[in-house]
Structures are given as C-alpha cells and as structure tokens.
C-alpha cells in the first residue's frame, strides 16, 4: 500500500516541474547577453496532465526536460533571449510555486488532523 495518493504524487511532480522551469529561466537570464545562446523552457503542464490521466504508474515515471525555443526571434548576435519575457515568466513561475506550496501545506494539515484527531 502506498503512503501517498495520486493527488500528492501529482503535487510532487508539479513542484519538480516548476523547480526545473525556474532553474531554466534563471539560466536564460544569466545567458541573455551570450552570443548564439538559445533560450530554453520547460513545458511540463501537458506531460503532467497526461500522466495524471494515466494514474500512479504514469505519474511515477513522468519526466520533464528543458527544450530549446526555436520560435523566438533571433537578435543580431544570434541569441533569442528577451529579458522582459524571461522576467515575466519568472514571476509566473514564482506564483505557481507559491500556489503549490500552499496546497501542499493544507494537505499536510489535513493529514496531521486525521492522524491526531485534532
């Protein structure tokens, strides 16, 4: 018997996806002035949604990885990093992370209450 349910596993995987996306956006910002650097992003929402419909086994095996963005326009130096867009994405990722943390806190409080009866 597993200790955690599908929702808890999905929250864990979502936090992994958000964390990877945050690191990837930070790398984009760090390399914004590197000639030829191509921005990367982690689009984990679709993969997570598909894994959720597949149940626990799919959630346990789902993996996320950064992909090079070939659609963003190139600058004269061959880079395609837009600092304003990256900062906006970083703010969005921070909000998503905060929401996940709040949901996880509530779930822990519910489990603690169920265990202690308080």
Image (cartoon, rainbow, N blue to C red):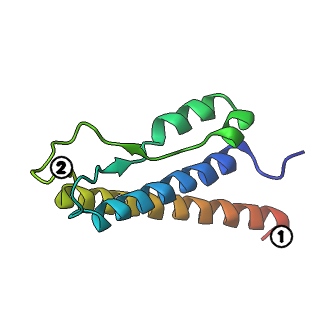
Q: Residue furthest right?
A: 1
Give percent across and percent down for residue 66. 45, 47
**Residue appearing at x 60%, y 49% in the figure:** 13
Q: Is residue 89 above or below residue 58?
A: below
Callout 1 crowding tier (Cα within 10 Å): few <14, some 14–19, many ≥20:
few
Residue situated in front as seen by the camera: 104 or 110: 104
Query: Which quarter of the rendered picture does the C terminus lie within?
Result: bottom right
Dot 2 lies on which element?
loop
Residue situated in front as seen by the camera: 20 or 11: 20
Residue situated in front as seen by the camera: 112 or 77: 77
Give percent across and percent down for residue 47. 52, 35
The residue wearing badge 1 is: 116
In which quadrant of the rendered view does residue 43 lie? top left
All told, the count of numbered labels is 2
Give percent across and percent down for residue 111. 75, 61
**Residue appearing at x 79%, y 61% in the figure:** 114
In which quadrant of the rendered view does residue 61 lie? top right
Mark 2 vs mark 1, CA separation in Å: 59 Å
**Residue appearing at x 77%, y 51% in the figure:** 4
Dot 1 lies on which element?
helix
Left or right: where 11 falls relative to 18: right
Give percent across and percent down for residue 42. 43, 47
In which quadrant of the rendered view does residue 63 lie? top right
**Residue appearing at x 90%, y 45% in the figure:** 1
Q: Is residue 23 above or below residue 9?
A: below
Q: Which mark is residue 78?
A: 2
Q: Which mark is residue 100?
A: none
């Amino acid at each position: 018997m597993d200790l955690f349910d599908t929702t808890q596993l999905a929250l864990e995987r979502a936090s992994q996806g958000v964390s990877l996306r945050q690191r990837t956006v930070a790398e984009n910002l760090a390399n914004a002035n590197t000639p030829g650097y191509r921005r990367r992003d982690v689009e984990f929402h679709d993969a997570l949604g598909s894994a959720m419909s597949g149940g626990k086994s799919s959630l346990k095996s789902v993996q996320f990885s950064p992909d090079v963005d070939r659609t963003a326009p190139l600058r004269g130096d061959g880079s395609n990093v837009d600092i304003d867009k990256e900062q906006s994405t970083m703010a969005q990722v921070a909000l998503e992370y905060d929401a996940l943390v709040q949901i996880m806190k509530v779930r822990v409080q519910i489990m603690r209450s169920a265990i202690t009866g308080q």
